[in-house]
C-alpha cells in the first residue's frame, strides 16, 4: 500500500497560479517582441523612402541644374517623404504606448509572484509596481534623472525622437525650396529652412507630450511604488 500523501490544496493552488502567471508573462514578452519588430520595420521603411527620394532628387538636379523644375519636383517629393515620416512617428508613438501597457502588465504579474513568494524580492532587478516610476525602472530608465539633461537627451535617443529630428530637417528643406521658388535670396532661404525646422520640432514635441497624457482607466496604478 502506498504511503505517498497527495499534495495539499494550498500548494496545488499556488502551483496553478504560478503556471497561469508564467503563461501570461511569456505572452506579454512575445507581444513586446512583435512590437519591437514592427517599430524597426516602420523605421526601415521610412529610411528607405527617404534614401530613394534623395537619390531621385540628385538625378533630377544633374539634369535640371537646380532650376525651377528641380524645385517643384523636390517640393512634391519631399512632401511625400514628410507625410511618410509623420505617419511613421504616429505609429511609433502608438507602439510605444502599447509597449508601456505590456510593461505595466508584466509588473503586475511580478507583483503577483512576490505575493506568492515574497522571499524572491531580492532576486528581481525589475519593478513589481505598476505606476510610471515602476514602469521606467523595468525599462531601465533612470527615474532619479528627473528634469536633468540626461532625461532630456534620452527623448532624442528614442525612435520617435530621432525620426522627429529627421522629419523636421525634411520640413526645413521644403521651407528652403519654397523660399527659393519665390526668388528669395540665400539668407532668406536659410531663415525659411531654420524656421520650418524649429516649427516642426516644436509641433512634434507638443504632439509627443500629449500622446502620453491620454488617461486609460485600465492603466491606473493598482500597486504604486512605495513613497521614499
Image (cartoon, rainbow, N blue to C red):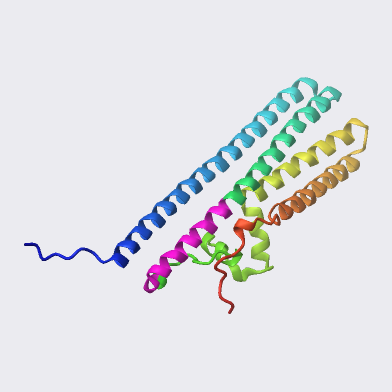
Residue 51 percent coordinates (x, y) = 65, 32
Going by the picture, which residue comes out furthest to the top? 63
Along the line of sight, the residue nearer the viewer: 85 or 114? 114
Instruction: Report the quarter where the N terminus lies.
Output: bottom left
In terms of image quadrants, where is residue 49? top right
Residue at the far left: name it: 1
Instruction: Give me the residue at 49% from left, 58% from top.
Output: 106
Q: Nearer the viewer, residue 94 or 37?
A: 94
Q: Is residue 8 left or right of residue 206?
A: left
Viewer-proximal residue among 92 and 194:
92
Residue 80 lies in what quarter of the image? top right
Q: Main secondary structure of the magenta part?
A: helix
In the rendered image, the residue lying farthest to the front is 1
Q: Is residue 43 left or right of residue 177?
A: left
Whole-percent x and y of residue 69? 83, 22
Instruction: Left or right? Give the position of 96 relative to 2.
Output: right
Return the x and y of residue 204 as percentages of the image width and height: 75, 49
Indicate yes or no whether the magenta region holds residue 112.
yes
* Residue 205 in picture, x, y percent from top left: 75, 52
Tell me the quarter of the picture where residue 13 sits: bottom left
Vertical placement of 158 versus 182: above or below?
below
In the rendered structure, which segment of residues is drawn in magenta?
99-120
Above or below, 104 against 225 in this view is above
Query: 98 or 198, which is in the foreground?
Result: 98
Confirm whether the magenta stretch covers residue 226: no
Quadrant, the C terminus = bottom right
The structure residue drawn at horizontal position 74% and vertical position 54%, both measured from the top left corner, is 210
Amino acid at each position: 500500500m502506498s504511503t505517498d500523501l497527495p499534495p495539499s490544496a494550498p500548494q496545488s493552488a499556488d502551483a496553478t497560479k504560478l503556471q497561469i502567471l508564467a503563461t501570461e508573462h511569456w505572452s506579454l514578452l512575445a507581444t513586446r517582441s512583435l512590437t519591437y519588430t514592427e517599430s524597426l520595420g516602420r523605421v526601415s521603411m521610412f529610411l528607405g523612402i527617404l534614401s530613394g527620394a534623395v537619390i531621385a532628387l540628385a538625378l533630377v538636379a544633374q539634369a535640371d541644374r537646380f532650376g525651377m523644375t528641380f524645385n517643384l519636383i523636390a517640393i512634391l517629393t519631399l512632401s511625400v517623404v514628410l507625410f511618410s515620416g509623420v505617419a511613421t512617428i504616429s505609429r511609433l508613438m502608438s507602439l510605444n504606448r502599447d509597449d508601456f501597457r505590456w510593461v505595466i502588465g508584466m509588473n503586475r504579474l511580478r507583483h503577483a509572484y512576490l505575493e506568492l513568494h515574497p522571499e524572491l524580492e531580492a532576486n528581481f532587478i525589475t519593478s513589481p509596481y505598476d505606476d510610471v516610476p515602476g514602469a521606467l525602472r523595468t525599462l531601465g530608465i533612470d527615474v532619479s534623472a528627473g528634469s536633468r539633461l540626461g532625461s532630456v537627451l534620452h527623448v532624442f535617443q528614442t525612435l520617435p525622437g530621432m525620426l522627429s529630428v529627421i522629419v523636421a530637417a525634411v520640413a526645413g528643406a521644403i521651407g528652403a525650396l519654397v523660399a527659393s521658388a519665390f526668388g528669395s535670396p540665400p539668407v532668406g532661404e536659410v531663415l525659411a529652412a531654420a524656421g520650418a525646422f524649429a516649427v516642426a520640432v516644436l509641433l512634434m514635441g507638443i504632439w509627443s507630450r500629449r500622446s502620453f497624457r491620454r488617461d486609460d482607466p485600465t492603466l491606473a496604478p493598482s500597486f504604486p511604488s512605495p513613497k521614499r
